[in-house]
Image (spheres, rainbow, N blue to C red):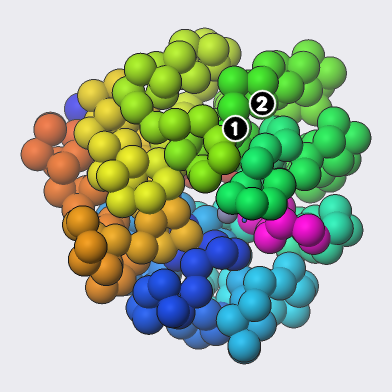
Amino acid sequence: MRKIALTCAVTGAETTRDDNPNLPITPGEIAQSALDARKAGAAILHMHVRNNDGTPTQDLEIFKKAIELTQNRCDIVIETTTGGAVGMSIEERMQPLQLNPEMASLDCGTINFGDDYFLNTLPMIRRIAQTMKERNIQPTLECFDLSHIDTSLMLIKEGLIERPFHYGLVLNVPGGVRYDDETLNIFVKRLPPDSFWTVIGVGGKASYQSIHDAVSANGFVRAGLEDNIYYSKGVLSQSNAQLVERAANIAKQSGLEIATPDDVREMFKLKNRP
Ligand code: KMH
Ligand code: ZN
């Protein structure tokens, strides 16, 4: 039976408490949300952190605290962000890599991000990839556009990224490529053979549809308040766990087994085990 890995992106950098009052902000809240998501079926936690006032930060001490509290509560695989928030410097963004997490995101190109833009030049991407390689951190190659997949192939050729490959295919960012199954299929067809991929559909509709598409196309799914604040049209999600639980239920109803964190450690050959 195929195993499907569910990632939960509990906080992100953009969602606010005004958008959804159930957003976890402090390290303690993030750890609790991770535990609840784990119980609902998540194997991977995509982690951003915030200052107490809710603003995004890549502060090392806050990451340290959030990781420690999460690991005290459960065995979930932690994937720290290196994307942070738009406008952050590369030095800021790379801070959590000093903690040698099991996984981290590696954003593979620049895109429109709402009215702003998310900057990832080739030298930036290479520098982050090199650091991850030196520290044995498994990258999730976040691709918001087809050109980002081509960039990842370039980095693979340069020896900066090694197998097994795990992609995060991010569709429906405002200003970016639309979400539909046809577009997702084009992305998937461009991946190197035997790549693992997780679909990240931004917004309620894309997020819901992405569960069904990943289930039927041999992919993995990301759910959580970073990408989507709604449970259904106009109805806010009560928690990250509620979104994960729905993805897990759909996958199980389709005959898939939900991967555990140790399954993911095995599949991705993770080296920095806690
Ligand atoms: N907050 C976005 C600008 C990542 O985590 O690597 C970037 C982001 C991607 O969320
Ligand atoms: Zn993120």
Pinpoint residue 40: horizontal percent, then vertical percent: 25, 61
Q: Which residues are magenta?
A: 81-88
Q: Is residue 133 visible?
A: no
Residue contact at pointers 2 and 1, CB within 8 angstroms: yes
Pinpoint residue 157: horizontal percent, then vertical percent: 78, 14
The residue that label 1 is drawn on is 143
**Marks 2/1: CA–CA distance:** 5 Å
* Image vertical order of residue 227 relative to residue 66, above or below: above
- Please tell me in which quarter of the rendered image ligand 2 is found: bottom right
Does ligand 1 reach within 8 Å of label 2's beta carbon? no
* Image vertical order of residue 107 relative to residue 36, above or below: above
Closest to the observer: 17 or 136? 17
Residue 86 highlighted magenta (yes or no): yes
Closest to the observer: 143 or 267? 143
Residue drawn 44% across and 54% down? 227
* 81 sits left or right of 45 in the view: right
Give, as a three-letter code, the residue at label 1: Cys
- In the displayed orientation, state which residue is furthest to the left: 253
The residue that label 2 is drawn on is 148
Q: Main secondary structure of the magenta part?
A: loop
> Residue 5 is drawn in which quadrant?
top left
Does ligand 1 reach within 8 Å of label 1's beta carbon? no
Residue drawn 77% across and 73% down? 60
Residue drawn 12% across and 33% down? 254
Residue drawn 86% across and 40% down? 124
Q: Is disc 1 placed on a helix, strand or loop?
A: strand
Pinpoint residue 175: horizontal percent, then vertical percent: 57, 40
Q: Which mark is residue 40?
A: none
